[in-house]
Amino acid sequence: MIVHLVWHVRHARNLDGSPVQHRDEDGELAIDEQFDDCKIIGVYADAVSAEAGITRARSRLGFRDEPDCFMIDTYTVGKDLWTEGFVTIPEA
């Protein structure tokens, strides 16, 4: 079974007042995992339902401030996504 997760990214404002970059040069959603606020909006059975969820969310408080900052990720239920271990790098 495949599911579609809809995410919204609320981009952190730049302290120097410079414009926030919402998309990169290729049009992909830019995400700074340290500062941006990423939310799962919903999990849907198909892409059409996921797009409809985005349409509904775009008019809601907060989301309408960044209406083009939604992303759909597709996942297979029951499949491991992180198949390697990890290490923690201490902060300097």
Image (cartoon, helix red, strand yellow):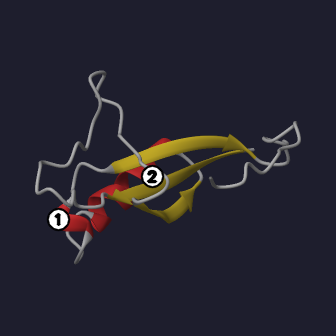
Q: Residue 60 appears in which quarter of the rendering?
A: bottom left
Number of labels in the image equals 2
Q: Residue at x 24, y 63 (%)?
A: 58
Q: Is residue 31 left or right of residue 76?
A: left
Q: Residue at x 59, y 40 (%)?
A: 74
Q: Is residue 61 above or below residue 55?
A: below
Q: Residue furthest front?
A: 92
Q: Residue furthest bottom?
A: 61
Judge by depth and name the residue closer to the eye, 7 or 87: 87
Q: Residue at x 42, y 49 (%)?
A: 32
* Mark closer to the chain start, 1 or 2: 2
Say few, some or many: other residues with alpha carbon within 10 Å of mark 2 (under 14 / 14 to 19 / 20 or more): many
Judge by depth and name the residue closer to the eye, 1 or 84: 84
Q: Position of residue 91 (x, y in %)?
A: 64, 55
Q: Position of residue 37 (x, y in %)?
A: 41, 64
The quarter in which the N terminus is drawn is: top right
Marks 1 & 2, CB-CB < 8 Å contact: no
Q: Position of residue 48 (x, y in %)?
A: 43, 46
Judge by depth and name the residue closer to the eye, 72 or 51: 72
Q: CA distance from mark 1 to mark 2?
A: 20 Å
Q: Is residue 70 left or right of residue 91?
A: left
Q: Position of residue 79 (x, y in %)?
A: 84, 42
Specify the label residue 50 is tagged with. 2
Q: Secondary structure at mark 2?
A: helix
Specify the label residue 15 is tagged with. none
Residue labelled with disc 1: 65
- Three-letter amino acid code of the residue under disc 2: Ala
Q: Residue at x 72, y 54 (%)?
A: 90
Q: Secondary structure at mark 1?
A: helix
Q: Is residue 81 above or below residue 69?
A: above
- Three-letter amino acid code of the residue under disc 1: Asp
Q: Residue furthest top?
A: 26
